[in-house]
Image (cartoon, helix red, strand yellow):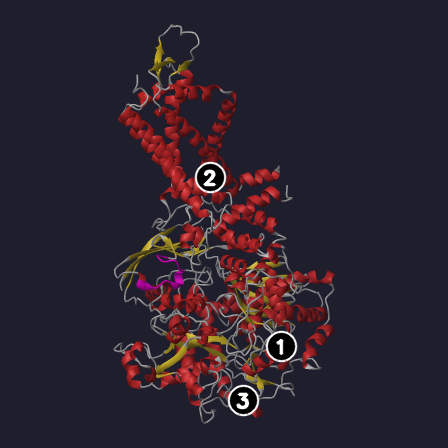
Amino acid sequence: MNWVNSLLGSNIGRKLVMALTGLFLISFLFVHLSGNFLLLSNDAGAKFNAYSRFMSTAGIIRVLEIVLVAGFLIHIYTAVVLTRKNASRRPGGYAAGNKTPGVSWFSKNMGLTGSLILVFLILHLRTFYFEYHYGTIRQVYYQEQSQGEMATKVKLTVLEEGQIPPSGVDVYKDMAYIAHEAFQSPLYIIAYTIAFILLGAHLIHGFQSAFQTLGFEHKKYSPLISALSWIIGVGVPLGFTIIPVLMKLLNPLYANQ
Amino acid sequence: MENVLDAKIPEGPLAEKWSKHKFGLKLVNPANKRKYDVIVVGSGLAGASAAASLAELGYNVKCFTFHDSPRRAHSIAAQGGINAAKNYQNDGDSVYRLFYDTIKGGDFRAREANVYRLAEVSVNIIDQCVAQGVPFAREYGGLLANRSFGGAQVSRTFYARGQTGQQLLLGAYSALSRQIAAGKVKMYTRTEMLDTVLVDGQARGIVTRNLVTGAIESHAAHAVLLCTGGYGNVFFLSTNAMNCNVTAAWRAHKRGAYFANPCFTQIHPTCIPVSGHYQSKLTLMSESLRNDGRIWVPKTKEDAELIRQGKKSPLDLKEDERDYFLERKYPSFGNLVPRDVGSRNAKYMCDEGRGVGSTGLAVYMDFSDAIKRDGESVISAKYGNLFEMYETITGENPYKVPMRIFPAVHYTMGGLWVDYNLMTTVPGLYALGEANFSDHGANRLGASALMQGLADGYFVIPYTLGDYLATIGPAKVTTDHPAFKQVEQEVSEHISKIMAINGTKTVDEIHRQLGLIMWDYCGMSRTAEGLEKARMEIQKLKNLFWTDLKVLGTHTEMNQTLEKAMRLWDFLELGALMVEDALTRNESCGGHFREEYQTPDGEAERNDDDFAFVSAWKWEGPDKTQTLVKENLQFENVKLSKRSYK
Amino acid sequence: MKLTLKIWRQKSTDTEGRLVDYVVDKISEDMSFLEMLDVLNEDLIKKGEDPVTFDHDCREGICGTCSLYINGRPHGPTRITTCQLHMRTFKDGETITIEPWRAKAFPVVKDLMVNRSSFDRIIQAGGYVSVNTGSARDANETPIGKEIADEAFNSATCIACGACVAACKNASAMLFVGAKISQLAMLPQGQPERKRRAEAMVAQMDAEGFGACSNTMACVAECPKSISMANIVSLNREYIGAKLTSNQV
């Protein structure tokens, strides 16, 4: 296994780890984003809460969660190791700085954007993840009510303390409400938006850089990857931030309540 | 006869000499090779190829360069290509034709047997370089491409865009690197050779200066190979790199190695002209430009004067106001005449007052007809990088305005005299590549320098050196030998003497003056009168050197001024010898043009009856006239003819 | 032109250095940058001051010796070697800061001169085809398509000046190493030693103390020989591929 050590201990090996974990984390972002879109459905959070419960309890997801946490930790740990090593490669620096033109700001500041994203991530986990698992979240159940010929309406009932729900209904922890509450604060929306702009900056470089590290380069396809990295870097944050904005402005969840 | 040198040319028919000779050479037993140490000075094409090849055979090699890396040697700057008699193009090339062209191009002042061997091994060089991964230009089918170069009638030149020298050197450097990694070559960088050490009349080592610490050190071996390039920088301005110098060869000369044909200097016709007094070096524009560029000056002095003052542009001159002087004088070769002829004619135009540019020392090379004929894209594909380089340096766009070019010192055919085995007159001391004199006669053909450097290093010395080593046996001399201490002391004294002058003139000031003297009197055309004058002027400069030179700092640290000062002194002594050599050669041949010896229409007039010999000079001591020793050239296979390019 | 120069002066590797101000006058715009430094040095010698030590040789952009970090960029404001840089690029009265390449793997020798022998050692680790002199077969028995030959040539034009390292925020040598690895990986001659070469050269590169690649492409932006990013990508591919599939355990 000497070769594994030598691969993972090499500069290229460390970059390989960054690339693989980075791409994995990007895949998680897509899952997360698609779930978040449920916050826009006009059902008082029924779908979103069901999704939250699945994500928090399903066995396969719990296993994947461990992998995800490991992915984050390895990504962060390797980044710290690389950054520290890289910083020691030019003791003293240049008096005149570096003025090479055409070098993207994103590529030079992955450490900065990554660190700030980490700060946000911790806050985010505090607001949602810990709240779900360890906090006191109101419990709700949903009942369908028919409204005329075609339409049905989902009726939300909040479970009072000690109240026993009617038989045959599923009780959910109301994560949708937590999100709804959080996004009532413009300050929170701004912080959330900034965090996703940083994430976008991280992705614009990170996505294409990962492919370069993996050795993928082709005259035909590399421009596509580079375009894709912009689409992802702009699209993912846009998707994430448009949800709270719409929630604040249009109140989609509870419009029918 | 005592005063005639024996080149040890093997007997037999020309085409069989090398094969027979190789068979006759003694071999060192493979198990014994590790008992021999060889010093290689220089890491250019000749040095790197020799060091690598000898290490592959099993010898212990020590290789020295004053550069920070062996890959920086000036072979790297050769642009055009490398000749080889492969006849891949089916256009009638052969070993014999390459041999003949080279002998004729050298104006019949080279040794037949050497040149034939050069042509013979040229084919192996290409094979070797391709095997190393040298990316030569190729055709779509995947086979090697060739071009015709320097006016040759066949396409035998292999090339890697305009960077052939770089690619060949990197090939040799990679072979050298492999041997360094294998521990068979010990590489000394930033280390300059300052003297040769002889023990019992045999070269047994060198004394060097560590350029970073200033330490004077000795290195012992069974043989010493000098692969230290040419001495064009005696002219101060040349296309050579700034650090090219004659020191290693010259110090060896002063220890008994004869110096041959020092006055044979090649002036390349297509260089970017001097722009001011601060000029530090000249840049060559590849000769291939002459395939499409038409060379001209204004027909009248008046137009030339107006152009010089900036009152007229070359574009204002109509076709009939221009003098395409090479096409006019040499209708069959036109702009593709050999380098010496092209250079001299440019000089004549400027002497007549028809030169252009602010200094009047330039002629035009015009691509407008080629652009009209083939389109700008075709010309750009062929010469784009050269045009860019020209624009970077001059600030002018050669697609719009004709290029200005002027001849510049480019290559020195002269060098240490060597016999057929590449050994100098000092046993155990060899000279390879441009550092020797052997293959180019009085003028070198384009794409032949790379060929010679690699031929010497890859395919000649590995055979001939073994013969010598087998003869002397493996017994070692160490650097504890008093001869080393003696030379170390002499080197140290020389350095101390220079450091102690403490005058007012900088090294470059004196070097510039030497360069001007050499250029004016010992350059493209020479006269007895001018040479006599140069002799006096150089003597004055030599005195100035020892009385008024200023070198700051100490000799025990990195001191670039001291390095240059030591090289300058050797150039001063060499310059004096070049003048003597030019004075004694009362004929015109190749790069050596004596105005007294020309045909009525101004062409060089060779004198085969009296001068078909190599002039080898023997050092007799400081301030003593050197003795001329001749090697008579025997031409058994070619008929001495007059070079005509009309 | 009159210019103020801020030049890094350092007596030797082990001593501290600092920026020193100099003024040069009557500089022609047709001078090369190094000729401007020649003028400064002539002045300094005349004044009895120690001239500035800097590496240079061919002065035509091919030997790779010159190595000045000018106004925040290796080789100065244009993408050519320092020796090709001419003073017409600068304005009268300008202040120019001149520093040596800075990298842990390129220690300063004196003033603006650095030691780049780490590059040589990387090549020695495997940047060659193991073919002894005389053992080659006829050159045309190994056909190589023109496109491949041209690409290999593009990689082979690296002059080992070190501008890539000087420009990189991590002082990484990936472009230099990548150029050699991809040249030989593209050619049939390089195949037998392909994996061994990639593993050995990368190991040496890391051992010399060069940083990792952040794919910022500053090296590519500064390379005077236009070595492309594809070389770094190819190096990644060659190395990872070699590590995963070679017989070296």
Query: Which SS class for mark 3?
Result: loop
Q: Badge 3 is on which residue? A: B642
Q: Nearer the viewer, mark 2 or mark 3?
A: 3
Q: Residues within 10 Å of mark 1 (few under 14, many from 20)?
A: some
Tell me where residue B420 appears, x and y as whole percent.
Answer: 64, 77
Query: Which SS class for mark 1?
Result: loop
Tell me where residue B269 appears, x and y as whole percent.
Answer: 44, 78
Q: Residue B17 carries which label?
A: none
Q: Residues within 10 Å of mark 2 (few under 14, many from 20)?
A: many
**Label 1: chain?**
B
Tell me where residue C26 appears, x and y as whole percent.
Answer: 28, 67
Q: Badge 1 is on which residue? A: B94
Which mark is first along the chain, 1 or 3?
1
Magenta part of the protein: which range?
Answer: C76-88
- 3D distance between C-alphas at marks 1 and 2: 59 Å
**Label 2: chain?**
A
In the drawing, does residue B345 fall left or right of residue B587?
left
Residue C33 is covered by the magenta coloring: no
Q: Badge 2 is on which residue? A: A82
**Label 3: chain?**
B
Q: What residue type is labelled 3?
A: Lys
